[in-house]
Structures are given as structure tokens and as C-alpha cells.
Amino acid sequence: MSTSWEAHFQQTIQSLKARDLYRSLRFVDPAGGGECRLADRTMLSFCSNDYLGLAADPRLSAVSRDTAEKWGSGSGASRLVSGNPSLYRELEHAVCRFKETEAALVFATGYAANTGVIPALAGPEDLVLSDALNHASIVDGCKLSRGELRIYPHGDVASVETILKENEGRFRRTLVVTDGVFSMDGDLAPLPDLIEVCRRRNALLMVDDAHGTGVLGDNGKGTVEHFGVKSPTLVQVGTFSKALGGLGGFVCGSSLLVDYLINKARTLIYSTGLPPAVLAANREALNIASSDGQRREHLLRLVNMLRSGLRKMGYEVPLDPTPIIPLVVGDSAAALALSRKLWDQGIYVPAIRPPSVPEGASRLRISLSAAHRTEQVERLLAALAHYS
């Protein structure tokens, strides 16, 4: 390696450290019941996206083990070659039933879904609108599309309509992309209004429901069910890696859409298929999420308890029904300091800093799981009250 590259690496790392933006990997082992093993300590964890507590569910482990014994450990090739076992068909049928759509297509990850679907739907002659707080995978997918990209203010439907109206007839097609639940703030996209605006302006709407799937709605079907909306042209993206406790992403919508994406989504075409054990566990997780409403009910009770307790302390916490609760503290140093204080109390909530959030909006991103108990949330509230 040349000295110029080494100097560049060193200068970059030193700059990140000076601005309290340096990151390093920590080895975190699950301990069950909302806890984890970290640095030889058992910590109370409030940073996992395992919202339904399914990641350690023994039913998923049993299905994974039995499938691995029967099918082996890997798929061996991309889905369009030989890495497409019939387990994929069963999983995609399960996704269709869960999301109430005609068809579904499973990707290796949620990130791969967004960075494959968006460039497949939009190209250099198209207009792409993206919410200012969309997840990085959406941002990257929009850039990869090479379309004309417009970032609209967070949740501002009037701005979306203005942009669509001003650009009517200038582009071949128009795609609007939004998260369903925003990953750092835990708030909801104004989905009913976006659907209506896109219908009037002949734009295609894509919603990434990674953080809503399994959590929102009476049956856990996500943001669409929560709002009680339907649109035959809506493109829904989701993931198995959060509330469903597994791995992989998916897109669902019309059969025509899925047929098109099989032929155009590069992250599907050129990625090795998921291991059979993962496919089977994802299907089992969907079955559990569909039938076990008690997990969601318990989770919502914890969400309401924590949000209410934080508001009483003076934190500006919205009353959204999602398990993502942001404690915005300002600069990176302040967020790190609060995270360390909780660490000393045996509570693990990492600081979230730029570029994951805007400058001046560093925070603790608290996330709840159905695996948590009421007394664990009370312990977190007591610790935060001590430092507020």
C-alpha cells in the first residue's frame, strides 16, 4: 500500500475521532429476554430491531436446523441460475398472503431490494422524488437510478404535489419513494395523502415498510394496514431482518411488477440466493407474526409506557405507535456522553451520529422489543430520569 493511501486513511480516522464521529465494531452476543453479552458483561439492550422478539424464537431455530439438515447450508448460485429452491416459492406465497398482494419477490437483503428495485423502476429520463429522511438504502437506490432526483421536505405532501405539477410532461415517468416508518425518528409517512397525490399526478409510489412490517396494523401487515389504504399500483418493499427476526428483503405488488423486476433488478440477478435455512425460518416467522397478536399488543403497551414516561421527564417525544423512540440531544459529544452513562448502569443504547442523522441531531435511538419486560422499561426510565 502506498504511503499516500496510508496517510489518507490515518488523516480520515483522526478527523473522525476529533469530531466524535469515529466508529468501531463491537461483538454483541444475544443473551435472551432483551439482554445481550457485550465486553464480558450482560447488558440490557435497547438498540435491536428485533421488534417482535422472534430472532431467538426456538420455533425459528428448529425450522432452520431441520431445513439445513435436509437442504444443506447454501443455495450455490443466483436465483436465475440454480439458487432458486422451491422454498422461495413457498416464502413468496406467504409474503403475498401477509401483504395481500398479487405477487412478491425476495432479495438477499432489504438494502439489496431498495438498490435493485429503484434503479429498475427509474432511469436517466425519469424523475425521482425522495423524502429528506429516507433510509440510506433508498438514497443509494435513487442515486443508482441516474434519474433526476428531487429531495422533498420530510413528510411534506404539498411539496410533492408542487414538484409533480411543475414537472408534468418533462420526464418519461415519475417515481416517489418514502419510508413507511422512518428508521431514526420512528414517525410515519403520510401514506394516504401520498397515494392520492400520486394517483392524481400519475406517479408511481414506492414505500419501504422495513420498520412497519410485523409491527403496525391489527394483523401486523404494516403501514398500509395501519392506515387502511389500498392502491393497485403501490410498490411495497420490506425486510425479514427486523420484526421478523431473519434475513432478506422483499418487494410485493402486481404480478406484472414482479415479472419486470426479475428481468431488471440487478441486485436480484447477480446475487447468490439465500440459504435454505433462512428461507424456511422467514416463512415460519411470517406464520407466527400473522397468528400471534399478543406480541404486538405487549410491544404497544411498552411503547406507550416509555413514550409517556419520557414526555413526563420533558423529552419531546411524539406519540407514534412505533417501537423506535428518538432522544435527540444535539451534538455528537453529548450523545456519546449520555450513552456512556447508561452503559455504566448496564444499559446499552448506542449514540447515533452523522451521517446517520443530520448535524446537530445526534441522539439515542431507543428501540423496544416484545422480548422486553415492563420492569426493564422501568429500569431504563429510572436511569434516564437520573441524568435528565
Image (cartoon, rainbow, N blue to C red):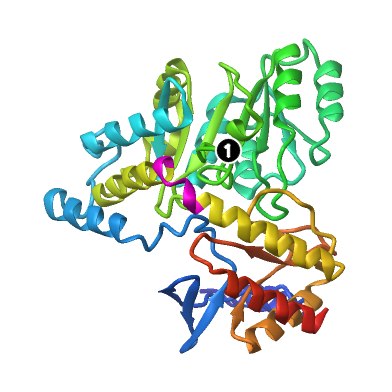
Q: Position of residue 280 (x, y in %)?
A: 27, 46
Helix, strand or loop for the magenta stretch, by majority = helix
Residue at the (40%, 33%) spot, across then down: 95
Nearest the viewer among 121 and 53 is 53
Residue 88 in view of the camera: yes
Name the side, left or right, on which 196 lies relative to 107: right
Name the side, left or right, on which 25 lies relative to 345: left
Q: Quadrant of residue 23?
A: bottom right
Say whether residue 210 is magenta.
no
Q: Is residue 147 above or below residue 179?
A: above
Q: Quadrant of residue 354?
A: bottom right
Residue at disc 1, secondary structure = loop
Q: Is residue 302 above or below residue 136?
A: below
Q: Position of residue 212 (x, y in %)?
A: 58, 43
Name the side, left or right, on which 297 lies relative to 387: left
Q: In the rendered image, which quarter contains the C terminus? A: bottom right
Q: How many marks?
A: 1
Nearest the viewer among 148 and 216 is 216
Q: Position of residue 19 (x, y in %)?
A: 78, 76
Q: Residue furthest top?
A: 169
Residue at the (19%, 50%) spot, across then down: 67
Q: Residues within 10 Å of mark 1 (few under 14, many from 20)?
A: some
Q: Which residue is mark 1?
A: 217
Nearest the viewer among 230 and 335 is 230
Residue 355 in view of the camera: no
The amino acid on which the numbered mark 1 sits, given as a three-letter code, is Gly
Q: Quadrant of residue 126?
A: top right
Q: Which residues make up the magenta segment?
A: 290-295
Residue at the (74%, 58%) spot, across then down: 357
Q: Is residue 12 above or below residue 285?
A: below
Residue at the (58%, 42%) spot, across then down: 216
